[in-house]
Amino acid sequence: MHDKSVVSSLESMGCEASANTWLMGKGFTSLLGLDRAEITALVHEAGEPGYRAKQIMDAVYRQRVETLAEISTLPQEFRERLAQSGVTVGAARIENTFVSVDGTVRYLIAFADGQTVETVWMPEGDGGEAGDGSEAGEEAENSSPGISGAEAHSETSEPIAGLKRYATQKPSRSTICISSQVGCAVDCQFCLTALLGVKRNLTAGEIVAQVCAVLKDQKVSPPEDRINLVFMGMGEPFLNYENFIKAARLLVEGVGIAERRMTVSTAGIVPRIRDFGEEKIRPKLAISLNAPNHALRTRLMPLNKKWNLEMLIGAARDFPLRTREWITFEYVLLGGVNDEPNHAKEVAELLRGLRCKVNLIALNPGPGIDFTTPSPERVVAFQKVLRDAGIPAFVRRPRGRDIYAACGQLKRTVEVATSPDAHLPGISPAPEA
Ligand code: SF4
């Protein structure tokens, strides 16, 4: 349905579209996105004592101020000098919010140049970490024991009254799904974000700014509140690698979210998977698999022509896993396309011997997507084949489908729905909250 050629220039598209403008001449323009060493350099250049760097780090990443005027620990004169030299905090602006009956909130977040991305808040998470060996995974399994079974698949299985509790009680743990690019170049055929292509990379500051904006809006603060992060929103993080990995480090060192509480999902940028394994500070790895063989994966993910299944699974087998760490493979089930029991057998064969688990996601429908959602029975049958073959398999709870916040549904649905190219199978834009 999107016939543009994407594979040949994926990496260059990601890089040249970068809008990393924090360094202008000698001066920084945005504090968000700077690490401790860079803020220390800024402070020294301004002739201020070294402890000002900690004050700025705390204000920007822990207190999540939005203006220089709010950094009350700094002298007024220093704040004025910073402002006069064009420095800002670089906070993101929440332009709109859409609230689901299940408590999920989809944020439309705007940056200085007017570009926007979507960021999703999921109270109680979506069970995506279940079985990945981490503390977050144990919490997901313990608090949602039904997540791996058939009942977790059905949106209607939990009474609406039960779902609404998320909106009224402070959750014990939550997940924020963040974007790494404006749009995406990867062109997965079942993904709404793919319809608009890629506009630009986000800077490290813009990636972190999404988290700061959501934490502030939700009035939660890590590490006191248990927050998990998934880099699974708009964009392919490994096509914006330097900014993504810097953001991950800032989220650990600045915002205070443990790396074991973060997961990054890649469509399969093989060279970057290998780079990622070398990082000292890094989230857990998830790989978007979606097909059990070369032909089907190439059809669903054109990227497979460049980095094929053999290369991808090779990189996964070589990946240096840490203690208690498992690789997550994500598999979006498309009715009648990749959801046959035989496909599940092929997946089990492909992954045999890997320390991994599989997250099954029944397709989230959307305007312009020509696939159907499989029945709950098909999902459970697929899961059973994997489990019988000894592969841990979990069904991810769909979150925020009514507001287009679920997996593969991000990217300004209003924009897609009003595009002359989009098919609109009777689906209206999500209502504003
Ligand atoms: S599924 Fe992810 S990688 Fe694929 S097009 Fe959508 S946003 Fe990009």
Image (tube, rainbow, N blue to C red):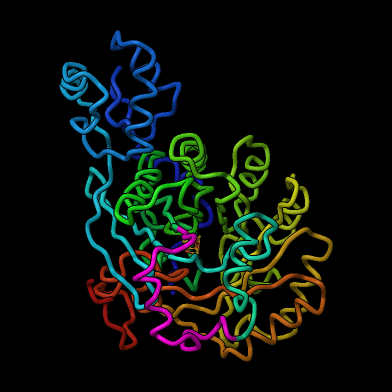
Q: Position of residue 406 (x, y in %)?
A: 44, 71
- Residue plotted at (56% across, 64% down): 302
Residue 185 in the image: above or below residue 399: above
- Residue plotted at (44% across, 59% down): 233
Q: Position of residue 342 (x, y in %)?
A: 75, 83
Residue 174 in the image: above or below residue 336: above
Q: Quadrant of residue 310?
A: bottom right
- Residue plotted at (39% across, 75% down): 165
Residue 267 in the image: above or below residue 369: above
Q: Quadrant of residue 198?
A: bottom left
Would you say 68 lies left or right of 279 here? left
Q: Residue furthest top?
A: 47
Say whether residue 368 is visible.
no
Residue 159 in the image: above or below residue 245: below
Q: Give the extent of the magenta segment.
A: 151-175
Q: Position of residue 35 (x, y in %)?
A: 43, 28
Say whether residue 362 is visible.
yes
- Please tell me which residue lies in front, 244 or 97: 97
**Quadrant of the rendering where the C terminus is positioned:** bottom left
Residue 166: within the magenta?
yes
- Please tell me which residue lies in front, 339 or 376: 376
Magenta stretch prevailing secondary structure: helix
- Please tell me which residue lies in front, 9 or 117: 117
